[in-house]
Image (spheres, rainbow, N blue to C red):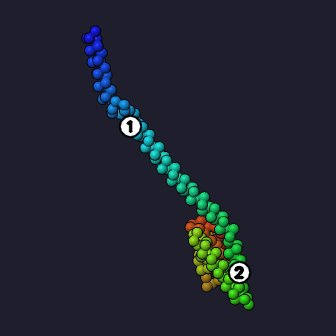
């Protein structure tokens, strides 16, 4: 019996040595499985990084879209305040108050990245301007903007409201 036990022990030792060649350790995963898991981990990590970038981009787009919608609703108020400032009045303090409110509103808009679109003297650009009329003027170049009816605004490269303009030649 001692010989059988000795043979069994030798067989078990050979099996363990064979397993140790394939394994990192006694309780560890085989090397091939480890490499597969590592590859899978790297792929999932890359997918997660892409997901985070995509989510941030979508969130920025949503923020800009909402900001544009809010600004678009406020712009008629800015137009009315600008018209009120142009009107002559007897009460200079009242006019100053309107000018201050207009300046404050424009400062708030510019702090959010809202810019006026340049018009008079610029070349007509259909992505920024809306032509409502055209005139012939020898003093102005081709497609040069002669007059502005309504100011346009943009946030970054996104147009919130097109400028209404008169184009020459």
Q: In the displayed structure, would residue 77 be above or below residue 4?
A: below
Res 77 seen here: yes
Residue placed most toward the observer, 97 or 133: 97
Q: Residue furthest top?
A: 1
Res. 118 image quadrant = bottom right
Numbered circle sitting on residue 83 = 2
Q: In the displayed structure, would residue 155 be above or below residue 142?
A: above
Residue shown at 69%/68% (left/top)? 73
- Write down the residue under mark 1: 35
Q: In the displayed structure, would residue 133 be above or below residue 52?
A: below
Q: In the displayed structure, would residue 156 be above or below residue 166?
A: above
Numbered circle sitting on residue 158 = none
Q: Quadrant of the C terminus?
A: bottom right
Residue shown at 54%/56% (left/top)? 57
What whole-number distance in Å separates the C-alpha atoms at marks 1 and 2? 71 Å
Residue placed most toward the observer, 102 or 145: 102
Residue placed most toward the observer, 87 or 105: 105
Q: Residue furthest right?
A: 90
Residue 117 pos. (x, y %) = 60, 74
């Amino acid at each position: 019996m001692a010989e059988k036990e000795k043979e069994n022990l030798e067989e078990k030792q050979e099996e363990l040595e064979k397993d140790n060649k394939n394994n990192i350790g006694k309780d560890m995963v085989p090397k091939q499985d480890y490499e597969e898991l590592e590859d899978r981990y790297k792929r999932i990590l890359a997918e997660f990084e892409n997901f985070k970038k995509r989510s941030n981009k979508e969130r920025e787009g949503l923020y800009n879209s909402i900001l544009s919608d809010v600004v678009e609703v406020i712009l008629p108020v800015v137009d009315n305040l600008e018209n009120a400032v142009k009107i002559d009045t007897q009460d200079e303090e009242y006019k100053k108050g309107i000018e201050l409110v207009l300046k404050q509103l424009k400062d708030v808009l510019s702090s959010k990245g809202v810019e006026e679109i340049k018009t008079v003297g610029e070349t007509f650009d259909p992505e920024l301007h809306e032509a409502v009329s055209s005139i012939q003027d020898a003093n102005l170049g081709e497609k040069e903007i002669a007059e502005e009816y309504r100011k346009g605004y943009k946030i970054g490269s996104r147009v919130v409201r097109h400028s209404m303009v008169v184009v020459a030649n």
